[in-house]
Image: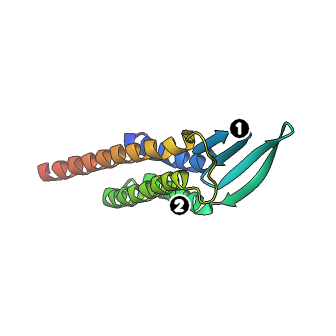
Amino acid sequence: MIQRMQSVLLLCIGVMLIIAPFIPNWKKEYGNQSIVQTGISIQWKKTVGGELTMVKSEPRYYILIISLVAAGMSFFSVLSFKDRKLQMVLGALNSLLLVTIMGLMLYKAQAPQGWIIEGEQGRYQLGLFLPMISIMMNIISNRLIRRDERLVRSMDRVR
């Protein structure tokens, strides 16, 4: 049932969670050095002779995996529109996964072990804000699912 508002929100959550790991979520620049963190890796780049070179790169696939699991849960929740109780449980689990993604991204942005460049603070990028928006959309969709469940129960009492 794509016409329901919670289905649209859940589809948007899934799309955002698929895109978010590939977009930079934190960046720090100082002189000719820069550190860029995505949900997949953290990269230390240096400009030498006008050419950008990769100094160090460290994969971080666990954020990608958790993000894809959360996206899959939200797509599955859209497909299980007939079982609203299952949708509520999936929404609660999805909220936990989204908070985990946010926590990991924030922690890794604040503590890049051995990657410190002295100088200015790093800046948060769009990739960090997409999971925040997904959390808010997940909360709204859970409320809409609960409202539908209450409406169905009240109609059953009338019969």
In depth, the one of 47 and 69 nearer the eye is 47
Residue highlighted by disc 1 = 31
Return the residue found at the far front: 118
Image point 74% across, 39% down: which residue?
A: 32
What residue would you read off at disc 2? 66
Location of residue 64 in the rendering, given as x and y in whole percent from the top left corner: 59, 58
Q: Is residue 79 shown to the viewer in this render?
A: no
Residue type at the position of mark 1: Gly
Task: Tell me, for residue 19, which label it has, or none.
Answer: none
Looking at this view, is 140 or 66 the one in front?
66
Q: SS class of the residue under badge 2?
A: helix
Q: Residue furthest right?
A: 49
Name the side, left or right, on which 63 lies relative to 10: right
Which amino acid, by three-letter code, is at mark 2? Ile
Q: Position of residue 99 (x, y in %)?
A: 42, 55
Q: Nearer the viewer, mark 1 or mark 2?
A: 1
The secondary element bearing badge 1 is classed as loop
Q: Residue at x 81, y 47 (%)?
A: 53
Could you tell which of marks 1 and 2 lies nearer the N-terminus?
1
Name the colouring of the figure: rainbow
Task: Decide: is 146 above or below 73.
Answer: above
The tally of labels here is 2
